[in-house]
Every structure is written in structure tokens, then in C-alpha cells.
Amino acid sequence: MRRSSLVLLVALACPATWAQAEERLQYRWRLDGFTGVIAGLFFPSRGEGSLTQEALPNGRWRSELLITSPESRAGEFFRYGAELEPVTLSTVRAWSASRWRGESRSKEAEVTEAGVIDIVSGIQLIRRDPPREPRAMEIWSDGRLYPVMVVPHGRAQRRVEGREVPVRHYVVRGVEQPGRRLWKGGLELWLAEDAAATPVEILVTRSAARVRLELEGGGPR
């Protein structure tokens, strides 16, 4: 049995312990949509991903989403990370790094404002405290803060290990506000209706790239 499947089954069996446990979920990814097909002619179009969580000696959590591809000689990757307070899941520190289309970027910053998420802390917060109605927040992205809205999109189905799994769909999108920059990225989550709210599918939009991650072993859509 694959590691991601084992984590999913353990979460179902041990609903009270998931939030404290260390976690490593494995994904496969592909570029999504027409632009993904075109980009795939010149850049990696698929690969592996992982979403990890670990406890730190200072009592906080460290969580990272890493996206890589063995197809690329240049070593393209995206990395999103955050240090979180485990009780409130507030973001204490955030970082991002990437190498894509010949460009390398790296940003890291302490986060002092309340209600701020990044890609990874956003995933963990929505898992822990899923909104029932649209929720306004701020997202840290490449060193800047942007206003966003977390919007629940209801129930759906995804296949995991050859079976249909009920999920809840959430979308994080930028919103226009006077005097503020518009976040042009995007994040969508399909969370299993298990005790861990396991992300069985994640869609990350960054510039022209839309990367769809599916829990490894999920089978055909």
C-alpha cells in the first residue's frame, strides 16, 4: 500500500490524533488546461509532489508543499512553506522558492499580521477550520500581501484507490480592493470527508502555470 493511502486509512481510523501527527502525503501532478498542453511542449508537464507537516522543537509546526519533476534537466520546482502556531494555525513565518522557465525566485519573511495565510498554511487552515460561507483573508505570496476570499463550493466526488471518495471543494481567489494589488494566483482544494480532511486534489495557479496535484494512487478521474 502506498504511503498516501496508508495515511488516509489511518486518518479514518484515528480521527482524534490527525492534527498532532506528523504527515507526509505523496502526489502526482500535471499541468492543467490548454496552456498546460502548450507549456508541456517546452517544459516539464508532470511529476511528483509532497505535502509534509512536522513538529518543531519550539512547539510550532512546519509544513511544506514541494512540486518537482524528473523530466527536467534544469530542475524546475516550486516550494511553498510555513511555520505555524499549532493551536490557532496562524502563520508565523512563510517562504517560497521556485525555478521555472529559466527564472529562480526565493522569498522568506516573518508574518506579524493576524489572519494571514500562504499557500501551505491556507491548505492546513481550511482543513482544520473549513468555512461554511465566503471568508475574507490575506495571503502572503512572494513577499507581498494580497486580499483573498476563501469560498466553499460544495460537495463533489474524487477517485482514491479505485473508489469514489466524497470531498468538499474550496477555492481561494484574489479580490479587487481600492489601493491593493490583485493576487493573480489561485488555490483550489478537494478535501476528503474524513477526520483528517485529507487533500485528495490540489490545484495551484501561478502566473500561466496551473499545476493539478492528485493524491498518489488515486486512479483515473
Image (spheres, helix red, strand yellow):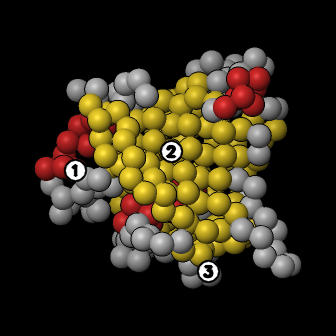
Point out residue 7 in the picture as x, y percentages from the top left corner.
26, 42
Q: Earlier in the sequence, mark 3 or mark 2?
A: 3
Q: Nearer the viewer, residue 135 or 141?
A: 135
Nearer to us of marks 3 and 2 is 2
Q: Is residue 1 above or below residue 166?
A: above
Instruction: Name which residue lies at 75% across and 31% down.
Output: 35
Residue 219 occupies quadrant: top left
In what quadrant of the picture does the N terminus appear? top left
Real-space Cα distance between discs 3 and 2? 27 Å
Query: Which residue is denoted by mark 1 in the rendering?
Result: 11
> In this rendering, would 206 be left or right of 5?
right
- Dot 2 falls on a residue whose secondary structure is strand
Point out residue 204 in the picture as x, y percentages from the top left corner.
60, 46
Real-space Cα distance between discs 3 and 1? 32 Å
Q: Is residue 75 above or below residue 136?
A: above
| Numbered-mark total | 3
- Residue 112: which disc? 3
Query: Which residue is denoted by mark 2 in the rendering?
Result: 202
Q: Amino acid at mark 3?
A: Thr
> In this rendering, would 6 be left or right of 84?
left
Instruction: Name which residue lies at 71% across and 46% down.
Output: 206
Image marks 3 and 2: residues in contact by CB distance under 8 Å: no
Nearer to us of marks 1 and 2 is 2
Q: Nearer the viewer, residue 115 or 34?
A: 34
Is residue 66 visible in the rendered structure shown here? yes
Are there few (<14), some (14-19), or many (20+) residues within 10 Å of tag 1? many
Residue 111 occupies quadrant: bottom right
